[in-house]
Image (tube, rainbow, N blue to C red):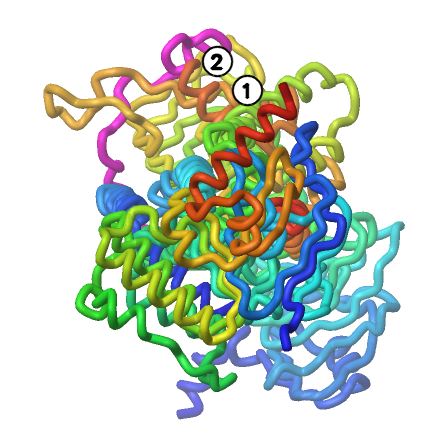
């Protein structure tokens, strides 16, 4: 599999879109950290990029790439390779390329300007979100053979997870404010990877505020290592489940 | 020569007759305290002294050499001072037992004046130093370290009740209920103390007028610092940090009036300052950094001046529970301010409203905190900035600074 | 002595409501050169794809050298496939694509002798550092062809091999196909260029509406229809069919 991944990565990192994405991230990171005297504000601006731009680019690029590689996938499947190898070499190839772009565009400047635990949390949640949205993109792509439809599904998922979902949670909390919603609100976040990533960063950035929420469930969740471990674990599930499901579909799919 | 001696004897009787005793065990100590005369010095040599309830009823100076250990084995108090001009230093006090009837303390000072307690260590004592109705006493350079249990079964580190003109300086207090506790104490100074990891308050005082608190650090206490029902407080150059929790504050101000709070640093607290029923306070040149809520002003506060402070990297700058707040925000620096300064006078041309919609929302629904910094929360705040509707209209800084106010660092 | 290489047994396949392969049973032997013919949408490409494992039949089995290909992939070591239109990662260079294929096929470990004849004859070495995305359709076809023959496979599946090639290259490729046929390889070709097939094919397999109409030697067909030219024969077949249906 490594043999193929190598070439997939080689191909993608020469892609103009990916180069542009890297440069865009780099310019944004440098301007956020460069213009702000307070690295804390820089981190917060970076958080917005990580929660919006990174998922958007990851999901759209991966979807387009999948459809553009369709004939190549056919050619590979005429070779003595299992479907598993073909599929995961593509997936990992895209993951590695976009992670490299992210690490270069965001990881490096963050490390230079804010190489603290907070900076690392930011980088790792961005990295996890990259992998998650590539997974989701592959899932969307395997679902339908129609490229336009696939991109539509991917965009829809991004819109739902990154913009709409929190609004729905907020209105749910408002409507049900007479009930104890403590556990429920934590459960809500588990169903959205961007929320999980955001909370992971909040646990480093806004810990003083989070500790102000009364209620034992919150206190336990945010004050201990448990919260961080649970969030990480769920994020990793968010990588594994879509891609495993996507592979299941791909394995039976007629190319 | 004889004549000279006679004159000296006549002139300084106390000096000349003051005798220095040296004790090496508990029997000697108890006997010496009994037979020593007023003004005598007792030097206590290193060793274990297991006893309880020793009463010092005359002016003695007790000096520990290489920290002799006074151990009450949890059966009672150690020293009770009922005389003026007693000095206790260089001793390690250990294992004062707890009781619900009387507050047992390592050193209890009752109705005495000018008692000095310095350079001592206190380990695992129910109460450390307990001053009651004693004036002009000083407590300096002590290390008071307890092992906290429940709030009811843990005593205070340094406790003062009904005292006047006392000085609490350069002490380190850890692991008690309240690190330093003042009730009905007036005209006193608390400075250069470090109070940390106490299960309730690092500093707790009530009905204690005209005191000054300076250069202290209060860190990681269960609920921070509580200051209540007091007038004329001077709080300067203190650091309040890392007080986290559902009801933890850098400082809780309840019914405080006519006081000055200046040059303090509030760093990384769940709530930096919590004000309830406060009037005519001057908040100047404080730094609020990385707090959950920098400043919470309850609606029953009025006539407070909040000016030339720096608000940096707080999750929320100001929160309030009501609307009619007659408090004045002036020329503070708010790092969240996004205005402009066309005439270059260093002050923003549009006013800054430090209460965000999202923080108002969290007032009503604390669980909405999980949406902090989400797209939705940002959107709400942006809309509110353009069309203010829910956040208090009159709580705003008309002249926010474009750059942080120059505030001298604390030289502790 | 001929050897049964590939065997289809009662293959059925539907895409939704449309049944594209209907109970197809046929077997191919070593040394045959089979032209798979039929109108558009008759199921030629699907049949090839089932053989390559890209499409899984709803029922029936396919055997490659007497082994079922279900859930297998190593048998594809024996197959060289030339797709109708090659789409390759645009930023890879020709050399890298070839290297990748060599890597995949483990040819160094397996000691497969590489057949670089087409690479040489198409002069691909002179353009080997060009990214695949910049190649013309014809050059891409040359790359596809070269890759199909590179590993000296026992079976060659060529989907419209000469489409898009210039006459000279087309001749080179046809010569190569004939040469490999002579070497005892099994060759499956789909093409719309009858004159090419006339030269290349030994057998004709004719599909219509997903059904196998016949699988016969070209020589027999010529006798049967008293006609030398393949395109005439096919025209006759198609006419005959229409007659039957009308």
Q: Position of residue C153 (x, y in %)?
A: 50, 72
Mark 2 is surrounded, within 10 Å at the Cα level, by few (under 14), some (14 to 19) or many (20 or more) other residues, namely: many
Quarter of the image for residue B378 reads top left
Which residue sits at x=78%, y=76%? B71
Q: Can the viewer see residue B249?
A: no
Examine the rendered structure and indicate whether residue A60 appears above or below residue C246.
below
Please state the chain letter of the residue tagged with numbered disc 2 in the rendered image: B
Q: Main secondary structure of the magenta part?
A: loop
Which residue sits at x=68%, y=51%? A230
Distance between the Cα atoms at labels 2 and 1?
Answer: 7 Å
Tell me where the magenta segment starts and ends, as one range.
Answer: B385-412
Dot 2 and dot 1 residues touching (CB under 8 Å): yes
Which residue sits at x=39%, y=71%? C179
- Return the residue at label 2: B391
Residue B409 painted magenta: yes
Please tell me whether mark 2 sits on a helix, a strand or a loop.
loop
- Return the residue at label 1: B360
Total marks placed? 2
């Amino acid at each position: 599999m490594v043999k193929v991944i190598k070439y997939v990565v080689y191909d993608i990192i020469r892609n103009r879109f990916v180069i542009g994405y890297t440069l865009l991230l780099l310019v944004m990171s440098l301007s956020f950290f460069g213009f702000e005297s307070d690295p804390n504000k820089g981190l917060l601006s970076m958080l917005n990029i990580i929660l919006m731009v990174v998922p958007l680019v990851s999901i759209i690029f991966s979807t387009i790439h999948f459809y553009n590689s369709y004939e190549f996938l056919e050619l590979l499947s005429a070779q003595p390779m299992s479907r598993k190898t073909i599929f995961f070499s593509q997936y990992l190839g895209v993951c590695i390329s976009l992670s490299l772009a992210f690490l270069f565009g965001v990881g490096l400047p963050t490390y230079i300007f804010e190489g603290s635990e907070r900076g690392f949390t930011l980088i790792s949640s961005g990295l996890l979100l990259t992998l998650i949205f590539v997974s989701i993109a592959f899932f969307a792509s395997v679902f339908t053979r129609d490229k336009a439809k696939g991109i539509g599904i991917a965009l829809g998922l991004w819109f739902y997870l990154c913009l709409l979902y929190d609004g729905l949670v907020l209105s749910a909390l408002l409507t049900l404010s007479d009930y104890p919603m403590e556990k429920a609100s934590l459960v809500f976040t588990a169903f959205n990877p961007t929320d999980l990533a955001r909370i992971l960063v909040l646990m480093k950035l806004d810990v003083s505020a989070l500790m102000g929420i009364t209620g034992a469930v919150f206190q336990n969740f945010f004050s201990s290592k448990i919260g961080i471990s649970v969030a990480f674990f769920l994020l990793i599930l968010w990588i594994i489940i879509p891609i495993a499901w996507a592979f299941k579909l791909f394995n039976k799919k007629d190319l | 020569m004889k004549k000279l001696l006679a004159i000296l004897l006549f002139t300084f009787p106390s000096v000349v007759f003051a005798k220095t005793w040296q004790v090496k065990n508990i029997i000697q100590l108890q006997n010496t305290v009994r037979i020593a005369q007023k003004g005598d010095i007792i030097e206590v040599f290193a060793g274990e002294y297991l006893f309880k309830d020793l009463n010092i009823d005359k002016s003695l100076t007790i000096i520990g050499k290489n920290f002799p250990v006074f151990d009450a084995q949890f059966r009672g108090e150690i020293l009770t001072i009922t005389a003026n001009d007693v000095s206790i230093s260089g001793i390690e006090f250990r294992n004062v037992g707890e009781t619900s009837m009387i507050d047992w303390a390592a050193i209890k000072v009752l109705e005495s004046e000018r008692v000095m307690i310095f350079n001592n260590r206190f380990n695992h004592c129910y109460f450390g130093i307990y001053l009651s109705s004693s004036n002009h006493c000083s407590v300096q350079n002590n290390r008071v370290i307890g092992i906290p249990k429940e709030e009811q079964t843990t005593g205070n580190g340094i406790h003062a009740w009904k005292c006047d003109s006392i000085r609490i300086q350069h002490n380190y207090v850890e692991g008690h209920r309240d690190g330093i506790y003042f009730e009905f104490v007036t005209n006193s100074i608390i400075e250069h103390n470090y109070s940390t990891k106490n299960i309730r308050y690092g500093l707790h005082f009530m009905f204690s007028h005209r005191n000054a608190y300076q250069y202290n650090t209060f860190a990681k206490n269960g609920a921070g610092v509580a200051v209540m029902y007091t007038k004329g407080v001077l709080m300067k150059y203190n650091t309040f940090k890392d007080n986290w929790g559902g009801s933890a504050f850098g400082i809780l101000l309840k019914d405080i009036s006519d006081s000055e709070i200046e040059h303090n640093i509030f760093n990384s607290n769940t709530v930096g300052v919590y004000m309830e029923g406060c009037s005519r306070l001057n908040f100047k040149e404080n730094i609020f950094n990385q707090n959950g809520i920098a400043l919470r002003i309850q609606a029953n506060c009025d006539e407070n001046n909040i000016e030339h402070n720096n608000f940096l990297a707080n999750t929320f700058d100001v929160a309030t529970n009501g609307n009619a707040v007659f408090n004045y925000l002036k020329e503070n620096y708010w790092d969240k301010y996004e205005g402009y300064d066309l005439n270059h006078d260093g002050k923003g041309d549009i006013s800054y409203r430090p209460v965000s919609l999202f923080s108002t929302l969290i007032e009503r629904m604390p669980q909405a905190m999980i949406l902090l910094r989400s797209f939705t929360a940002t959107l709400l705040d942006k809309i509110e900035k353009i069309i203010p509707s829910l956040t208090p209209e009159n709580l705003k800084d008309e002249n926010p600074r474009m750059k942080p106010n120059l505030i001298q660092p604390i030289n502790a | 002595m001929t050897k049964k290489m590939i065997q289809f047994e009662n293959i059925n396949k539907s895409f939704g409501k449309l049944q594209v392969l209907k109970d197809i049973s046929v077997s191919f032997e070593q040394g045959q050169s089979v032209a798979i013919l039929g109108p558009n949408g008759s199921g030629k490409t699907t049949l090839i794809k089932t053989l390559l494992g890209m499409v899984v039949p709803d029922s029936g089995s396919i055997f490659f050298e007497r082994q079922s290909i279900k859930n297998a992939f190593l048998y594809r070591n024996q197959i060289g496939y030339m797709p109708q239109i090659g789409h390759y990662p645009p930023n890879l260079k020709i050399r890298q694509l070839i290297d990748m294929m060599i890597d995949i096929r483990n040819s160094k470990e397996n000691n497969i002798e590489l057949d670089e004849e087409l690479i040489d004859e198409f002069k691909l070495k002179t353009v080997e550092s060009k990214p695949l995305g910049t190649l013309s359709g014809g050059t891409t076809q040359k790359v596809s062809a070269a890759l199909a023959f590179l590993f000296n496979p026992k079976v060659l599946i060529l989907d419209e091999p000469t489409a898009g090639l210039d006459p000279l290259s087309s001749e080179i490729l046809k010569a190569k196909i004939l040469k490999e046929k002579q070497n005892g390889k099994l060759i499956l070709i789909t093409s719309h260029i009858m004159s090419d097939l006339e030269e290349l094919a030994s057998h004709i397999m004719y599909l219509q509406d997903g059904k196998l109409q016949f699988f016969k030697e070209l020589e027999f067909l010529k006798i049967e229809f008293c006609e030398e030219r393949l395109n005439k024969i096919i025209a006759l077949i198609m006419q005959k069919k229409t007659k039957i249906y009308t």
